[in-house]
Image (cartoon, grey):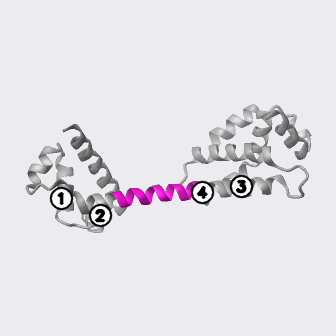
């Protein structure tokens, strides 16, 4: 976000601060001037930081991009005849966008966790191979992956595996996903 701030400061020409806000918005709606967009970004950067602190899982680069996107849309759609301040209008839209992006991210993470759980629960039944050593050798797994697979096949839960490795359950989900990906690539190549 700070890199975007530096870039936006370099776009400013200094004339923007001498005109009132509604005139700037009107000019932006007519010309889509990048220096006006930069002016609003720079002048409202503190607010953007304050809002974005509530969404720590979003990357700062993404937040800067979402901010510019929403700032552009807000400037274009702001009704110059309304009594509400522009900053209130923008802040509400920006919060809604970040909330939506956060919900999408959480949904993706939940789907990944479900897929990992399904992989853990169904690995042996899907492949229908009795000799696990033979299975693991066929898929060119390294010793760590073989050990991890044997834990899964032995019926260890995600929590038990995490406790054994002394890592978080999220890391175990990640390991399962990587293992599943590797085995699926091998199956596709057969």
**For mark 1, what is the residue?**
124
Seen from the viewer's position, the closer of residues 9 and 102 is 102
Q: Is residue 99 above or below residue 73?
A: below
> Main SS of the magenta segment?
helix
Earlier residue among tags 4 and 3: 3
Spot occupied by residue 145 in the image (x, y as percentages of width and height)? 21, 50
Q: Is residue 40 left or right of residue 148?
A: right
Q: Which residue is mark 3?
A: 93
Q: Residue at x 58, y 45 (%)?
A: 62
- Residue ID for mark 4: 100
Q: Is residue 31 above or below residue 154?
A: above
Q: Which is in the foreground here, disc 1 or disc 2?
A: 1
Could you classify mark 4 by the number of other residues whose Cα lies within 10 Å: few (under 14), some (14-19), or many (20 or more)?
few
Q: Magenta span covers which residues?
A: 101-115
Numbered mark located on residue 162 in the image: 2
- CA–CA distance between discs 3 and 1? 48 Å
Task: Estimate the x, y position of residue 107 in percent, counting from the top left.
Answer: 48, 58
Counting residues from the N terminus, which is met first, the one under dot 1 or under dot 2? 1
Q: Is residue 71 magenta?
A: no
Q: Secondary structure at mark 2?
A: helix
């Amino acid at each position: 976000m700070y890199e975007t701030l530096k870039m936006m400061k370099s776009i400013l020409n200094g004339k923007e601060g001498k005109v009132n806000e509604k005139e700037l918005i009107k000019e932006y709606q007519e010309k889509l001037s990048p220096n006006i967009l930069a002016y609003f970004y720079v002048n409202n950067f503190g607010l953007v930081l304050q809002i974005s602190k509530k969404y720590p899982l979003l990357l700062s680069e993404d937040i800067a991009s979402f901010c510019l996107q929403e700032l552009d849309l807000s400037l274009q759609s702001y009704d110059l005849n309304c009594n509400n301040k522009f900053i209130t209008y923008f802040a509400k839209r920006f919060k809604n966008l970040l909330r939506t992006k956060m919900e999408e991210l959480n949904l993706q993470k939940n789907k990944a966790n479900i897929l990992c759980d399904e992989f853990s629960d169904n690995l042996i039944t899907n492949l229908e191979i009795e000799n696990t050593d033979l299975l693991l050798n066929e898929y060119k797994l390294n010793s760590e992956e073989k050990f991890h697979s044997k834990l899964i096949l032995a019926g260890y839960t995600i929590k038990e595996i995490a406790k054994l490795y002394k890592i978080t359950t999220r890391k175990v989900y990640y390991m399962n996903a990587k293992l599943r990906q590797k085995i699926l690539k091998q199956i596709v190549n057969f």
